[in-house]
Every structure is written in structure tokens, then in C-alpha cells.
Image (cartoon, helix red, strand yellow):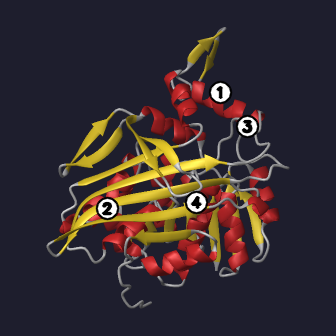
């Protein structure tokens, strides 16, 4: 029984590989990446389950399908723009699927494949990472006993306490970050979707320690693509996402300068794509991930502010996730949280601890108490305040 991690040599995929290998729930972990050297490095760092590396280009559907055939699950850690292509190959190979997010618009395209996955008897989970992922599960956990849910505002903040680290560092896909900085944010308000400029709605918010007071902004994200439908029967009318922390202003400046653009620019007679140039530069300067010798100490906190009704009584709750780094693995808070969520999801799929088939968001297919218990074992704490709803009995 094999697990395939596509993009397993990347910033978050390599964490999934290590966590899956440590868990020993699979017979083999297969690390597949366009960059074979990165895949081999991820495989060699894994301890426990036998782990192998291979090269794959997800843009080649026939080779991808052959690679996936016979696998028990596919964890897709490649750039989100390829999510549908990977899902199509999973359908053809008959393999369950999960990814780390689709940045709203891609998520909605993925949901359109629901009937085909249901007909095939397969489960596909879009957005099972940190945020989206943990945020979605917490939304359902915190509202389970409410009779009505009026609004959910998801705020995410981070703080870097690392000593001697680089001034500039990317812990998540630079392409995804740039998309968030230059694409309109989509907010579910008044029962319908409306667009707002990226980095609008600035707000100072006091996160739990060690993040503390942080300015957050609206950006494009995936939670609003699924939560309004998942909580439709409870009357959800407002759902939005905001984020902020060190480096977000730099990202916005890079986007405003056009460095996220994909239209070629003539440079002394050579056509240069700004985004491709930036990615190559970041790779050359080793600004992707924590450099060797640096003891990372950054934290991320997500806070869901929920307004609803329990009977005739108004309720305001905060569902909170605190994400630590994994310095012994050289991983930041984001890399660690996203990666282990993918591993937890893969293990829950093969253990039949998920609900339903089709394209099902994490808030509907995961038993929240079970998922949160696995997070806790990995040092990720989640709380619901002021009151934790009584847990229903868990059934496999």
C-alpha cells in the first residue's frame, strides 16, 4: 500500500513525506517531483517507512496516470494551478486525492468534479492543509451545537522570532503568495459573493501569544469557497478571510512592481517573464525555505470569530489554532502545519476515518475530534472559546 506525494520535494511536501514515513501506516512512500534532486533529498531525510524518489511532470497526464496506478492515496503538493489536472489523473487511476488549497477559484472548479468522483466511488479532499484545512474543520467544530450561524471571519497572523535568520524568506509558494497579493479578494457577504481589492480592509487584531497585535488584510483564499455551502442550513450570511504578518507588505510591493506578472517583458532583445525570473532568482539566492544552520522560531495563529445563535441566545465564539515550527526538521510553522495536515488526511483516508465520496471539503468529510487529536499529537493545539461544544460519539 503506497502513498504518492506529488511535489514531495517542495517546501510543504517534504514535511508530508517525513510525517508519513514516521507514521508507518503505508508500505512505501513515493516522492514524485519535477526536480528529481529535491525528491531524492526529501526521500533520504525520511525515517521509518521505505521511501523512494522519482521524477514526474504533472503536465504529462499519461505518465502521471501510470505513476499513480496502484497507489492507496495521492497527496498533491504541487502548485495549485495544476489541481484539476492531477485530479483527472487520480480519477483515471482510481486513486483517492487531497491537496493543500485552490485559492478560491480553483477550489470551485474542483468542486465541479464531484459527480465524477462520486460515480467512481472515490474521495477527493480540496484544501486539506493548514489554512484552508484546519480553519475549515474548526469552523464546523465551533458551530456544531449552534442553531444559527450568522458570520465567520477568519484571521491569520504570524510572527518570526528566529535569531540570525535571513531578512527575506519564503515558507510557502511564492507564486501563490503573489496571486493573493494581486487578485481580488472574494468575500461572502449578505448571502452572495462580492469582490474587494487585494490587501483591503486593513484591521489591527490581537492574536494569541506569541503572535500578538498584527495588521491583517483581505486576500483571496479558499475557505469562503466551501463554508457558505457547508453551513447553508444554519443560515451563514458572511464569511471572509484576512491575513497579515512580517513580509506581507514586501509581497504586496513585489506584486505592484509587476514581479508576479506572466506577460513577457523585453529586456535587451530577450523575452523575460517577470514571475519566472523572480522564482529563478529566489532559488539561486536560496530564499526558499530555512537555510541550513538556522534554528527557526516562527509561529502562526489562526482565529475564527463566529457569531451565531443557540436557541434564542446570541453566541460569539473564537476557534483558534496555534502552529509552532519544527526546528529539528528545519521547518517553519507554515511548512510544518501544511505538511502534517496532508499526512493526517492520507492516513485517515486509508483507515476509513473519512465520511463520503466525491469532492468533499475537509469540514464535511473529516471527523473533527479525530483530526484535532492527530494535530495535538504533533504539537498543534486547537481551542474553542468560551465553550467547547460537547463531542458527539466517534464512529469509524
User: Within 10 angstroms of label 2, few (less than 14), some, or many (20 or more) residues?
Assistant: many
* Circle nearer the viewer, 4 or 2: 2
* Circle nearer the viewer, 3 or 2: 2
Out of 18 and 319, give the one closest to the viewer: 319
Tag 2 secondary structure? strand
| Precedes in sequence: disc 4 or disc 2 | 2
Q: Position of residue 284 (x, y in %)?
A: 77, 34
Locate the N terminus and report the quarter of the image it occupies: bottom right
Would residue 218 be visible to someone looking at this image?
Answer: no
**Residue position for label 1:** 277
| Precedes in sequence: disc 3 or disc 2 | 3
- Give the distance between the C-alpha atoms of the residues marked 3 and 2, in whole angstroms: 40 Å
* Circle nearer the viewer, 1 or 2: 2
Task: Answer above or below: position of 27 versus 208.
Answer: below
| Precedes in sequence: disc 1 or disc 2 | 1
| Precedes in sequence: disc 3 or disc 1 | 1
- Give the distance between the C-alpha atoms of the residues marked 1 and 2, in whole angstroms: 42 Å
Locate the C terminus and report the quarter of the image it occupies: bottom left
**Residue position for label 2:** 306
* Circle nearer the viewer, 1 or 4: 4
- Give the distance between the C-alpha atoms of the residues marked 3 and 1, in whole angstroms: 10 Å
- Give the distance between the C-alpha atoms of the residues marked 1 and 4, in whole angstroms: 26 Å
**Residue position for label 4:** 338
**Residue position for label 3:** 283
Q: Are marks 1 and 4 in contact (CB under 8 Å)?
A: no
Q: Position of residue 316 (x, y in %)?
A: 29, 64
Picture quadrant where residue 53 is located: bottom right
Query: In the figure, is residue 27 to the left or right of 197?
Result: right
Tag 1 secondary structure? helix
Q: Position of residue 36 (x, y in %)?
A: 76, 52
Extreme residue toward the right, this view: 293
Could you tell me which residue is drawn at 81 percent across and 49 percent down?
Answer: 294
Amino acid at each position: 500500500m503506497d502513498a504518492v506525494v506529488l511535489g514531495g520535494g517542495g517546501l510543504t511536501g517534504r514535511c508530508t513525506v517525513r510525517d508519513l514515513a514516521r507514521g508507518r501506516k503505508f508500505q512505501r512512500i513515493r516522492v514524485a517531483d519535477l526536480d528529481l534532486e529535491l525528491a531524492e533529498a526529501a526521500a533520504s531525510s525520511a525515517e521509518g517507512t521505505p521511501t523512494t524518489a522519482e521524477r514526474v511532470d504533472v503536465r504529462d497526464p499519461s505518465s502521471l496516470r501510470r505513476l499513480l496506478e496502484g497507489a492507496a492515496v495521492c497527496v498533491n503538493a504541487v502548485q495549485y494551478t495544476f489541481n484539476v489536472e492531477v485530479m483527472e489523473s487520480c480519477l483515471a487511476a482510481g486513486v483517492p486525492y487531497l491537496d493543500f488549497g485552490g485559492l478560491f477559484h480553483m477550489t470551485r472548479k474542483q468542486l465541479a468534479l464531484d459527480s465524477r468522483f462520486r460515480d467512481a466511488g472515490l474521495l477527493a479532499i480540496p484544501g486539506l492543509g493548514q489554512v484552508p484545512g484546519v480553519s475549515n474543520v474548526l469552523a464546523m467544530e465551533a458551530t456544531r451545537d449552534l442553531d444559527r450561524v450568522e458570520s465567520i471571519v477568519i484571521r491569520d497572523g504570524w510572527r518570526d522570532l528566529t535569531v540570525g535568520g535571513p531578512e527575506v524568506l519564503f515558507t510557502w509558494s511564492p507564486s501563490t503568495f503573489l496571486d493573493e497579493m494581486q487578485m481580488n479578494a472574494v468575500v461572502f457577504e449578505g448571502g452572495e459573493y462580492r469582490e474587494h481589492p487585494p490587501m483591503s480592509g486593513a484591521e489591527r487584531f490581537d492574536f494569541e501569544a506569541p503572535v500578538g497585535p498584527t495588521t491583517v488584510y483581505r486576500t483571496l483564499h479558499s475557505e469562503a469557497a466551501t463554508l457558505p455551502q457547508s453551513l447553508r442550513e444554519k443560515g451563514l450570511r458572511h464569511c471572509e478571510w484576512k491575513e497579515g504578518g512580517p513580509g506581507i507588505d514586501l509581497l504586496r510591493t513585489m506584486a505592484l512592481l509587476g514581479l508576479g506578472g506572466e506577460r513577457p517583458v523585453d529586456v535587451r532583445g530577450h523575452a523575460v517573464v517577470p514571475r519566472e525570473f523572480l522564482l529563478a532568482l529566489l532559488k539561486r539566492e536560496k530564499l526558499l525555505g530555512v537555510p541550513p544552520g538556522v534554528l527557526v522560531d516562527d509561529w502562526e495563529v489562526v482565529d475564527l470569530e463566529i457569531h451565531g445563535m443557540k436557541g434564542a441566545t446570541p453566541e460569539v465564539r473564537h476557534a483558534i489554532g496555534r502552529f509552532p515550527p519544527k526546528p529539528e526538521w528545519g521547518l517553519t510553522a507554515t511548512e510544518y502545519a501544511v505538511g502534517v495536515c496532508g499526512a493526517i488526511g492520507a492516513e485517515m483516508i486509508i483507515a476509513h476515518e473519512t465520511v463520503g465520496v466525491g469532492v468533499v471539503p475537509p469540514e464535511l468529510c473529516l471527523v473533527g475530534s479525530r483530526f484535532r487529536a492527530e494535530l495535538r499529537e504533533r504539537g498543534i493545539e486547537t481551542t474553542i472559546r468560551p465553550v467547547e461544544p460537547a463531542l458527539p460519539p466517534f464512529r469509524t
